[in-house]
Amino acid sequence: MNWRTPLLSPWAKPFVWFVLTLPAVWLIYAAFNDLLGANPAEALTRSTGDWTLRGLCMVLAITPLRELTATPALLRFRRSFGVTTFVYACLHMLCYAWFDQGFALDDIWQDILKRPFIWLGFGGLVCMLPLALTSFNTAIRYLGVRRWQILHRLVYAVAVLAVLHFFWMRAGKNDFVEVAVYAAVLGALLAWRAWKAIQSR
Amino acid sequence: MLIRIAPPAASVDLPSAITPASSYLNRRQLIARSVAAGVLGSGLSAAWAQATPAPTVAPGKLPALANKRSNLEGTLATDVPTAYTYASTYNNFYEFGTDKSEPARNAHTMKTKPWTLEIEGLVKKPMRLGLEEVMKLGAMEERIYRMRCVEGWSMVIPWIGFSLSTLIKHADPLGSAKFIEFVTLADPKTMPNVGSRVLDWPYTEGLRMDEAMHPLTLLTFGMYGEILPNQNGAPIRLNVPWKYGFKNAKSIVKIRFTEKQPATAWNKAAANEYGFYSNVNPNVDHPRWSQATERRIGEDGLFNKKRKTLMFNGYEAQVASLYSGMDLSKNF
């Protein structure tokens, strides 16, 4: 059996969806069972942010992996990764709006305007919105593949905004180890694309 | 069924016998907690319950530290004390790692015996005191202080120690001494993160002389009836309850009297974010977040709105006069 065969199984996609929801399921379970330590609000906000960054790394890794390993079947999973990344970003925003700001919309808006660290993150989420809204097959048909592809290059901006948001958050702690890891992974994935674009000219 | 919070049997001969949990909590809170515990059962957690029935007594693993309740005004906060587990596992002590769970995991390697405190700088006679000598200088008092972290959370902790002024009088500083600098332990062999470039080690802090002499400023040796656990800054730390938590230097090895304002670790790392004074002030935002509200660890559930932060962390009556005429938004 070829190692690629399972990728084409009808169970592959539901399985990927299932795996991608596990972190969220765990966080909700942990919140209800007091497993998140002294500051559950902080733990939930940070974890959902971490999973957004990880999701971005995974979704951006699909195209390079597909080409480097000659595995076109990987494309089937790109939407699952993309949509769950958006869901984690929404949960992250929800944690901030709920636990940190108590849903005081006026305060949230002031906070976004006032603090570059917040508006970078918010900007990243706003950029993800059109991508999530056009993630259906009908949307692709409606826009046309070419235009859809151009629109979805916004994900590169999302990656940059997400890393800057994380960098700024950690700047106060002077602790850049994790930031450097995400920046290196996302930087390499974007650099690979830039290199391909230059080559294909 | 109402009074379900019985201290563990083992704690009868422990320091908790001196200050039982029931005296930290008033009757109404006790009843509310018991009802919450009874109604919600164990399936629902701190996330839902407004008050967790977590014990506010130490587990009794460390030696007891005899003490008397302080009778100084403002030293016995009426807030509900934070559970010992939270106070001893959610710590910022960067020498042991930047994640707040790391100090509790890593700090056991620190050697707190023997411990020497050096006193130098503008004093009549520089001296080196053993920990036991320092501890004999004053009568051990228990004080329940609010502790507000610059990150936007707070705890309420029953500390044991005596006013720093007692030590300062013993050290006999010269008239030219205007500030006091605290130098803390930086031992790369026992502190895994001291090799990192996160801060300029050793961690140093400082106070103006009148702040250091203020009776609320506590030289601390214990908490919850016992000696300090390593992750909380054993064997000697500072508590200045009207300032953000990072001003409270941990595991102090040296006290230096100076004429000029000493450099402090966080101020050197990010001067625009962490000022020398760092008084708790809801009106002066941190550049990256508001300081108007805070989350009380273990007490404010996940879905409670954060509570309002008080000017000088609620110690305004005692300390505001230290800063009269100063622009606190400039001298943040």
Image (tube, rainbow, N blue to C red):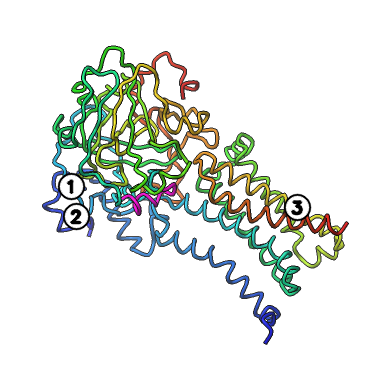
Q: Quadrant of residue B224?
A: top left
Residue type at numbered disc 1: Pro
Counting from the top left corner in percent of width and height, residue B271 is at 50, 29
The disc placed on residue B20 is 1
| Disc 1 to disc 3, C-alpha distance | 59 Å
Chain of the residue that carries numbered disc 3 in the rendered image: A
Counting from the top left corner in percent of width and height, residue A76 is at 72, 72
Quarter in which the N terminus of chain B is drawn: bottom left
Q: Which residue was labeled with disc 3?
A: A154
Q: Nearer the viewer, residue A156 or B269?
A: B269
For the residues bearing labels 2 and 3, Cβ distance under 8 angstroms? no
Q: Which residues are magenta?
A: B97-107
For this view, does A89 lie left or right of residue B206?
Answer: right
- On whether residue B98 falls in the magenta region, the answer is yes
Residue type at numbered disc 3: Leu
Q: Is residue B160 above or below residue A136?
A: above
Counting from the top left corner in percent of width and height, residue B162 is at 20, 31
- Where disc 3 sits, the SS reads helix
Name which residue lies at 19% across and 55% down: B7
In this view, the residue farthest toward the front is B189
Q: Which residue was labeled with disc 2?
A: B7
**Residue neighbourhood size for the residue with mark 1, other residues' Cα within 10 Å, grouped as few (<14), some (14–19), many (≥20):** some
Instruction: Between label 2 and label 3, give the one nearer the viewer.
Output: 3
Residue type at numbered disc 2: Pro
**Could you tell which of marks 1 and 2 lies nearer the N-terminus?**
2
- Where disc 1 sits, the SS reads loop
**Residue neighbourhood size for the residue with mark 2, other residues' Cα within 10 Å, grouped as few (<14), some (14–19), many (≥20):** some
Q: Quadrant of residue B71?
A: top left
